[in-house]
Amino acid sequence: MDASPSSTPLSARPIEPEGKVYDRAFYLLCGGTVLFMASFGMLLPELPAHLAQMGGEQYLGGIVGMFALAAFLSRFLSGRIADKAGRRKVMLIGSAVTAVAGFGYIVATSIVAFLALRFFHGLSTGFRPTGTSAMLTDRIPKNRRGEALGYLGVAGNAGMASGPALGSWLTVEWGIEWMFLASAVLGIVSLLFTWPLEETLPDARAVRAADLNPFKGPLIDPQAWPAAVVLLPIALAFGVYLTITPDFVDHLGYVYKGSFNTIIVVSSISMRFIAGRMSDRYGRIPMMLAGTILLFVGMALLGAAETKTVATIGGLVYGASIGINMPTVFAWTADLAQPGRIALALGTMLMALEIGIGIGAV
C-alpha cells in the first residue's frame, strides 16, 4: 500500500512494481521537461536566418555544432556529479543555463558572441537530461522502466512540438527578441518546477572541486558502450535533420517553419505512448531494430521529397522511428549500468547523441 505523502518524503517512499509509480514527483519531472525542451527547441527554426542576417551564413553549422560540442564535453562531468552530488543539482544547473542563454541572445549582436553563446547554451542539455533520466530511473522499477522513460519522452517531445511552433509565431508576429525572451522565461519556469523535487540519490553531498576535475574519477561507463554505438547513427541523422530542415521547409513553402517540426514530434509522441511498454515486454534490441528500419525509410522519403505530401509522410515515419528508438535506448542504458553509476552510464550514452548531432550538423 502506498505511503502517505505527508508522512514519508518523496525520496524515501518505496515504489512497488505493481503499485502507483506516477506521482507528484513524476509529473513535476515531466512538466519541467516540457518547459526545458520548449525553451531551447523554440530557437531552432529561426536561428539560421538570424545568424545569416548577422553576416554569418557560412557558420550555420555552428548553430548545432557548437551546442552539441558543449553538451558532449559537459557530459564527462554531469554524470559523475549526478552520481555523487545528486540528480536535482544537475537538473537545476541545466535549467539555469537555458534561462540565462535566452536572455543572452538578445544582446549577442556579433557572430563571435552568438557562437560563444551557443556553446554556453549547449551545457544545458549536457546537464538537465542526464539528471532527469537518472532521477526517473531511481524512482521506477525495472519492469516499468521503458514505459516510464517513454512517457518522459512524450513530455520532451511535447516541448519540442510546441516550442518551435511558438518560436516561429513569435518571430513572425512580434520579432525575434520576443522569441528569445520567451525562451528565457520558459527556462526559469522549468527551474521552478524542479526546485520542489526531493533528491533520490542516497547520501547526496555538495559538489566538490574534485567532481569538476576530469583527471579524478571515471568520466564514462564502458557498460553503456553498446547502447552508445547503436545511438550514434540515429543521432547523425538527427544532426542532419536539424541543420537542413529550416531551408528545406522554406523551399517547400512553409510560412511557419516550426510547423513541419511539429508533424515529426507529434508522430514521435504517438509512438512513445506504446514503444516504451513494448520494449519492457519484448526486449530492447528487437525494438531498436524496428526503429532503425523506420529511420532509414523516413530519411529516404525526406531526402526525395519535392512536395509537402511526401515530406509529411517522411516526417511521420521519421518521427515514429524517434519515438521507438529514444525511450528504448535510455531504458537499455539503465539496464546495462552498474549499481551507483546510472547517471554516468546515461551520460556516456548521451555523448554518442552529441557526437552524432555534431557530425551531422556539419
Image (cartoon, rainbow, N blue to C red):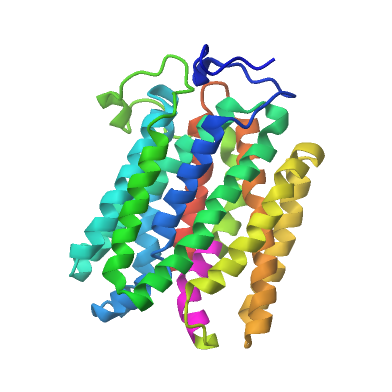
* Relative image position of residue 45 (x, y in whole percent): 43, 71
Q: Magenta region, mostly helix, strand or loop?
A: helix
Instruction: Give the image quarter of residue 212.
Output: top left
* Relative image position of residue 257 (x, y in whole percent): 47, 76
| 134 displayed left or right of 178 | right
Instruction: Give the image quarter of residue 225.
Output: top right
Placement of 6 over or under 76, stated as above or below: above
Q: Residue at x 36, y 39 (%)?
A: 192
Q: Nearer the viewer, residue 174 or 30?
A: 174
Q: Nearer the viewer, residue 124 or 172?
A: 172
The residue positioned farthest toward the right in the image shown: 282
Residue 222 belongs to magenta span? no
* Relative image position of residue 300 (x, y in whole percent): 67, 75
Q: Residue at x 48, y 59 (%)?
A: 357
Q: Nearer the viewer, residue 234 or 327?
A: 327
Magenta residues span: 238-250
Instruction: Give the image quarter of residue 92.
Output: top left
Q: Is residue 171 in sight in this rendering?
A: yes
Q: Looking at the figure, which quarter contains the N terminus?
A: top right
* Relative image position of residue 291 (x, y in whole percent): 71, 56
